[in-house]
Image (cartoon, rainbow, N blue to C red):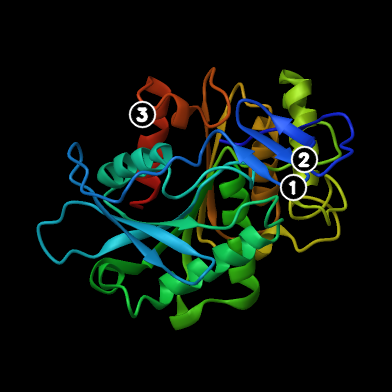
Amino acid sequence: MDAALTPSPAATTDDELVYESMPCIRIYRNRVERYLGSEFVAASTDAATGVTSRDRTISPQVSARLYLPRLDAATKLPVLVYYHGGGFCLGSAFNPMFHAYLNNLVALANVLVVSVEYRLAPEHPVPAAYADSWEALTWAVSHVDEPWLADHADFSRLYLGGDSSGANIAHHMAMRVGAEGLARGAKIHGLVMIHPYFLGSNKVGSDDLDPTARETLASGWRIMCPTTTGEDDPRINPLVDGVPGLEALASGRVLVCIAEGDVLRDRGRAYYDRLRASGWSGETDIWQAPGKGHTFHLLEPCCQEAAAQDKVIAEFLNC
């Protein structure tokens, strides 16, 4: 779930508040206090689903939580490399909310998931999250030292996905694969974009759903990426003129999930429309949750719309 940051009065000492988005985060000149998304839950076998998880250290900066569904034999499974959301400043692969979500998705879709733990801004400004996410992806496709991947991963069915800022990351990983490729000839079979965090200086209809939230999303981006040129920075606006087009996206299929009440709704729809018009050769689909807001599936995991979205994603991961 992405957080929006709003400016406070100018700080005059190292201990004064610089930015805040309550009840999620406060940023001071000399420290960051997070009140949401940093809670930890251990890897385990989930009693409700039978899904087993375990953690792997990839490098001093990067780690991952792997999820494996209950198996009857040495089955080969689709692989989903997943990037959590949180506005680049919140969340964790080890957080109970994302852990519960992926336990359920893994059981429903019968896939192997690599959930990536990347460094957070503002301590590690964007593009650190992209660098860490790429490192995790390249580790996953090498899989030589990870028995679950070696024994159960079908890399002809490799997917990337994420929610909100994690969907932003997944997009950039797929674009980088298009430019550089992956080891062992691995290819991205599909891309799952859940409520993607994109902005732009052009106005879209959903901006008016909550103008305050829309503005604070923009101010949050400027804090998380101090080197940004603004809302038309291609890292936050992949549709801006003069950057590599979406026809270079290295994925055979794309699913974009949006929510009717999300201020970012029409950014996700614009991404889908541009992809279809770009000359990209893959298959794409879009699904909208009626009456729901941004990352509602994490906040209301048992609601009817969350179940419907999960079903759409599970079917996509098995095509």
Pick the residue in front: 72 or 60: 60
Q: Are marks 2 and 3 in contact (CB under 8 Å)?
A: no
Q: Residue at x 51, y 65 (%)?
A: 62
Q: Amino acid at mark 1?
A: Asn
Q: Quadrant of the rendered structure where residue 47 is? A: top left
Q: Secondary structure at mark 3?
A: helix
**Residue 15 marker:** 2
Q: Is residue 192 visible?
A: no
Q: Position of residue 239 (x, y in %)?
A: 76, 50
Q: Which mark is residue 30?
A: 1
Characterize the local packing of mark 2: few (<14), some (14-19) or many (20 or more) Cα atoms within 10 angstroms: few
Viewed as shown, does residue 150 lie left or right of 88? left
Residue 307 circle label: 3
First of labels 2, 1 by sequence position:
2
- Residue at position x 50%, y 27% in the image: 296
- Give coordinates of residue 20: x percent, y percent: 72, 32
Asked if residue 23 lies left or right of residue 219, the reply is left
Quote the CA–CA distance across marks 2 and 1.
Answer: 6 Å
Q: Position of residue 22 (x, y in %)?
A: 65, 26
Q: Front-most of 299 and 152? A: 299
**Residue at 20% in and 40% down:** 49
Q: In the image, what residue type sits under mark 2?
A: Asp
Do the numbered discs 2 and 1 sit on residues whose CB atoms are within 8 Å? yes
Q: Nearer the viewer, residue 265 or 59?
A: 59
